Image: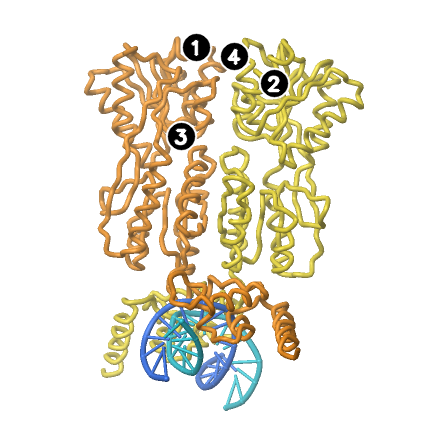
Chain colours: A orange, B yellow, C blue, D cyan
Amino acid sequence: MPEVKKNTDKTDKLLEKAERHKATSYDVAELAGVSQSAVSRCFKPGASVSQKMRDRVMKAAKELGYEPNAIARSLITRRSNLVAIIISNLTNLYYPEVLAQLTQCLSDKGMRVLLFALESESKADEVLQQIWPYQVDGVIAAAKLTDDQLSEFDKRAIPLVFYNRFYTSHAINTVCCDQAEGARQIVNDLVKAGHQSFAFIAGPSDSVVGNERQEAALKRLKQLEQENVTLINGGFSYEAGEGAVTTMHDKLGEFPDAVICVNDMCAIGAIDGLRHDFGKKVPEEVSVVGFDGVGPAGWSSYNLTTVRQPVGRMTDAAVTMLMERIEDAGMPPEKRVFAGVIIPGNSARLAED
Amino acid sequence: MPEVKKNTDKTDKLLEKAERHKATSYDVAELAGVSQSAVSRCFKPGASVSQKMRDRVMKAAKELGYEPNAIARSLITRRSNLVAIIISNLTNLYYPEVLAQLTQCLSDKGMRVLLFALESESKADEVLQQIWPYQVDGVIAAAKLTDDQLSEFDKRAIPLVFYNRFYTSHAINTVCCDQAEGARQIVNDLVKAGHQSFAFIAGPSDSVVGNERQEAALKRLKQLEQENVTLINGGFSYEAGEGAVTTMHDKLGEFPDAVICVNDMCAIGAIDGLRHDFGKKVPEEVSVVGFDGVGPAGWSSYNLTTVRQPVGRMTDAAVTMLMERIEDAGMPPEKRVFAGVIIPGNSARLAED
DNA sequence: TTGTACGCGTTATCAA
DNA sequence: TTGATAACGCGTACAA
């Protein structure tokens, strides 16, 4: 049976060739005895190919272990199916969850994730230079960018969605949690429960999220005619919260009724500082509240009273918003603001309703 | 000055063209009045180009906002400069740190990170299918792969380095922490300090790391003639640790002198369970120890006695190992095992030395 | 040192 | 439905 023999010979020859490099669509075409474009079509969903052709091609493809080369595809289609995620501080306990959900969600929509972690926000320029060459279809940024950097995106017409960063100066796509409203609510609750002196442990001065929380909280305290309010420098970390408690003690000589912290990590640090460095009881002697609703906030050592961000909904929204703009470059900028959810917890004395 | 006019005209024409698409090396070449290959060379470090040529090309490039296209480059060089990182459970507090360091380290070496997060280890196949088309230069896996999956890497000759996964069946590249030695040491210390009854809270049964820790701990306890040892099912999470404490109480009616947990998160959950669900004092009444040395282990509510993994050194080693194999495909498989460091902490009564 | 010409592996276009 | 041919944007022998 010369026909069969010839076929296996051909397979062997091509397999041998494939050993040096991966099999290409040409190799498959040759083995299947069809044109290369036919092979290409067989791997394109929704292309018009006869069943007979498809079977033949797929058989040959399997035999050679052929897989389409996404790099070559991207070159011609001008779609890389790559999305860059820029995250400022991965070590902040809040972000791993965000990252995991974003990745999951993007993956479901057929996009791959190029990860860029900023060790400091000032290194954004460097990271952008690394992103441009890869022809990403879009970018999700959980980091602050300068106006110049924003206009680089405009210039390149690369869709960009911010996560929890808000810009008043630009019309930009963003998904965020209503930091201000969360802050107001929690202040309301604290005042209503009879707290009369307050401290706010602030975040890094260049953090938009931190500043929003801070301003909203301080403003509402003023509205509710609370005069006894101290602002303490802190940060987003456990250590910052712990340290701020000492600063507070040095400054005031005592502790306020309630300590409002810029985020959960900071609040947890503050609680530990109060309890272990100063022997204070939380919440009996001092109420402590945070923001975010990270995992450890729920641990029974803390049971933190906090404003939880609806991470799942937010990441979904961010991905959807980005995809829409990748499909249709003409979509206008959009802001989606989600409300936070107060988690009563047990680290603050709140009024019973 | 017709010369100048002509030049700006050309710039305008090319800029106009560039508005539709990004400028290519051809556009730059045309504007600079040189060949495309000259442009290419100017962007290749260490190529032989005269200073005059370089200046001319760079000026034109800047004018058109030209940036080399990494996709096209990858196609021709057969190097994508892409490394895939596969991580099983990003929400495990231990991994964000690993991921951050790996990304940092790879970035320093000019590689970009494609991130794949597994929601469950069984989804590895799916993820691998997503990886192959992208022609990644290498893969770092902090997840378990089957033998079949391993041989897929062989077949494609894609360098693979495992992080904290150990295979005895295959000669494979891996960087890990000596889980067994850490377990033995901590058992030694506990026994030496006079503990006489023990419980081990286990991890998921399919976790290699968890099993190693468990086997080594139980074996050493036996060697030291400790008979009073209970094994409790648990897991890697806070909730698992907390739940295991209740299981333990149901099973024993009391608590052992020392609880050895499969990792820090579990240990923290166990401490909280003991303290808040059963009113036990840690370490006075029950000693609790963990593994990993994650951030929260150091928080003063816990001060966990644990075995810290030298994450920085391990990630460095993993990246170096991978890069070596990317540069030289002939490098033989290698295992690098790092010793853990005992952090005395304050959650266990250890002997003073 | 520079330019010419080709190839990387795919999709898109158009005619058959 | 199929096949021939031309892109996509770049790196690199080779010759000049």
Same chain shared by disc 3 and disc 4 = no
Where does label 1 land, which residue? A281
Residue B72 visible, this angle: no
Q: Which is nearer the eye, B255 or B299?
A: B255
Q: Amino acid at mark 1?
A: Lys
Measuring from the top left, give residue A60's x and y in whole percent.
55, 68
Q: In the rendered view, would you say B87 is above or below A291?
A: below
Measuring from the top left, give residue B294's x and y in whole percent.
55, 31
At 35% across and 66% down in the image, what residue appears?
B62
At 35% across and 78% down in the image, what residue appears?
B30
Give me the C-alpha separation between circle 3 and circle 4: 32 Å
Residue A235: give its label.
Answer: 3
Secondary structure of the residue carrying tag 3 is: loop
Q: Chain of mark 4?
A: B
Lower sequence index among marks 4 and 2? 4
Specify whether A137 is left or right of B145: left
Q: Amino acid at mark 4?
A: Asp
Q: Quadrant of the N terminus of chain A?
A: bottom right
Q: Amino acid at mark 2?
A: Asn
Specify whether A329 is left or right of A52: left
Give me the C-alpha separation between circle 4 and circle 2: 20 Å
Q: Quadrant of the C terminus of chain A?
A: top left
Q: Amino acid at mark 3?
A: Gly
Same chain shared by disc 1 and disc 3 = yes
Secondary structure of the residue carrying tag 2 is: loop
Give me the C-alpha separation between circle 2 and circle 3: 26 Å
